[in-house]
Image: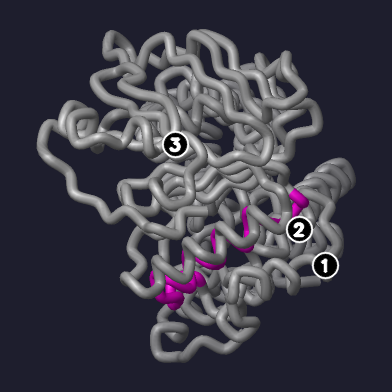
Amino acid sequence: MVSKGAARAPCGSASNALEVEGLSVRFGESIVFDALSFEVPRGSSLAIIGPNGAGKTVLFKALIGALPHEGSVRWAAGTRLGYVPQKLDIERDLPVTGDDVLRAKAKVTGAPTSDVARAIAAVGFSASSSRKPIGALSGGQFQRLLVATALLGEPTTLLLDEPTAGVDEPGQVSMNETIARLCRERGLTVLLISHDLSVVYRYASNVLCLAHGSKACFGAPTNVLTPTMLEGIYGAPVAYHVHEDRS
Amino acid sequence: MIGGLDAGGAAVAIGTGIAAGLVGCFALMRRMTLAADAISHIALPGIGVAVLLRIHPMIGGVAALLFGALLVWTLEQRTRMSTETVIGVVFSMALAAGSLLATGDELIEALFGGSGRFTVIETLVGIAVAAVVVTFVLHQRHRLVLALVSPEIARTSGIDVPRLNLRFLIVFALTIALGLRYVGVLLIGSLAIIPAATAKRLAINLHGMLAISVAVAVFATIAGTYVSHVLHRETGPVVVLIAGGCFVVSLLSRRCA
C-alpha cells in the first residue's frame, strides 16, 4: 500500500488524493521529465497524455516509488492503490491462470476470498475465463482480468496504464464504460494513461500533457485539448471525437 | 534405505527433491533457467577454499552460494541489469576459479556428486534447510506470483519487491547447497529446472505446476539414487537423466493438472 512507501508524505490538503511537487526523473544523463507539479483532487480522474517516450509510464512508476526520483509525491493518508500495468513481464505460455493472479492479490492485500468473485463480476470477466491460463485469454478478457485484480484490496485510487491496449473497438467502449461506472460507484480517484483523446475528453476531469520532458499543459479537457495544443504536443494535427454526453 | 543412502540420507534426498521442485517452478517462471546452472558454479571456489582450510567442504560451498546470491542482488539493484546477465557473468567466472582451487577426487565429487553416508549433523542440517526452503515457497507463493506478473502490481499491493527478490535468491542458493552433496555443482541446477519444465508442459494452473514439479524431482532423486547405486555410477548424472526422461515423456503428453 502507498502508505508504506518511502518519501511519500501525506497530502497537505484533505481534498487532494495526490500532490506532486518538483518531480524529476533522470536515467543517467537523460532527463525523462523535469520539475513536474500537479494535484489530483479526491474522486476526480486525471488523464495523462503525450507521445510515445514522453515518460507517462515512468511517471506512474515514480508515483508508486518504483523509480528513484527528485521532488515530492504526497498521497492522501490511507491511500490504497490498484494498478493496471501497460504490459506484463510474464511469459504467456506459463500455467498461471486468472484465478492464480486474483487469489494472489486477494491473499497479499488481505481481501476476503468472496471479493474475488465480486471483482470478476464487476468487470464482466467470466468465472470460466478466470480458470484459463492467462496466455489463453483474448485481449479484452486479459485487460478485464487486470482491472479485476486492481479492484481487489479495496483501492481508493486506480492507476490505469492504457487499460484498453490491444482490445478491439467494441471491447474498448465496453471496458471504458465499465471503468467509469466502477469509479462513480466506488468514488475512486483515477489516474489514466491513454492515447485515445476521445476517451480522455469524455471521462477525465483534468488532463496532464507530457512532452519534451516537461508539463506541456494541465487543466480541464475542454480547456486544454485544443488543436493548437495537441499539434504542439504530438508534432502533428490530432483528430478526436467530442462526446456530447460527457460525464 | 535408498540405494547407498541410509534413512537420514534418504530424508535429505527427498527434502532436496521437494525443495528443488518448488523453487525450480519460480526460477523457471522468472526466466532463471540458465542462471540456475550458472549460480551453482559459485559453490566450487567455496568448496576449494574449504578443502584448503581443512573444514567441511559444504560449509565453504554454502558460504560461497550465499555470498553469490547477495552479490547478484546488489549488482541487479545498482546496475539494473537482468538477473540472467549478472549471473551469467559472475558465476561462470566462479567455475573457472573453483576448478583451480579444488583438485582430484574432491573436484569430481563436487562436480558430479557422490552418495556415501550422511553424518547426523549433515542429515539434521539438510532436513532443516529443506524445511526452510519449502516453508518459504509455500508461504510466499502469492507474493512471488504477483512480483512475477508485474512488479508494479506487487509494489502497490504492499510488497517490498527488491527484498522479496533477495530472499528468493537466498532460498535458491540454499536449494543448490542442499543438492551439492550427491547431485553435484554441475547438475543441481538441472534438478531444479527440468522438473519445473516438465510441470510447465503438463499443468493447467500454478498449484498443478508446483505439485507435478515436486513429484518429478522427488521421483528423479529417489530413482536416480537407487539406479546409480546398482550401476555403480555417480549419482548426479543418473538423477538428471531420469528427470530428463520425465521431460521427454511430457513432450508426448497433454496438460493434465
Find residue A241 and report its image quarter: bottom left
As shown in the figure, which amino acid type bears the numbered disc 1? Thr
Q: Which numbered tag is attached to residue A113?
A: 1
Return the residue at label 2. Answer: A106
B207 drawn magenta: no
Q: Residue at 22%, 34% (x, y): give it.
A: A230
Tell me which residue sits at (72%, 47%) in the image: A155
Most common secondary structure along the magenta stretch: helix
Magenta-span inclusion, residue A137: yes
Q: Are marks 3 and 1 in contact (CB under 8 Å)?
A: no
Towards the viewer: A183 or A67: A183
Q: Residue furthest left?
A: A236
Horizontal and vertical percent for residue B196?
54, 66
Is B154 drawn above or below residue B93 in the view shown?
below
**Chain designation of label 2:** A
- Disc 3 sits on a residue from what chain? B
Q: Read off the magenta span.
A: A134-154
Residue A156 location (% of width, % of height)? 72, 43
Residue position for label 3: B83
> Which amino acid type is marked by label 3?
Thr
Residue shown at the point (57%, 22%) measured from the top left: A39
Q: Residues within 10 Å of mark 2 (few under 14, many from 20)?
A: many
Distance from disc 2 to disc 1, alpha carbons, whole Å, reads: 7 Å
For the point 70% across and 55% down, the residue is A105
Q: State which tag comes first along the sequence, 2 or 1.
A: 2
Secondary structure at badge 2 equals helix
> How did the renderer colour the structure?
one colour
- Give residue B68's mark: none
> What whole-number distance in Å separates the C-alpha atoms at marks 3 and 2?
28 Å
* Residue B172 can be seen, yes or no: no
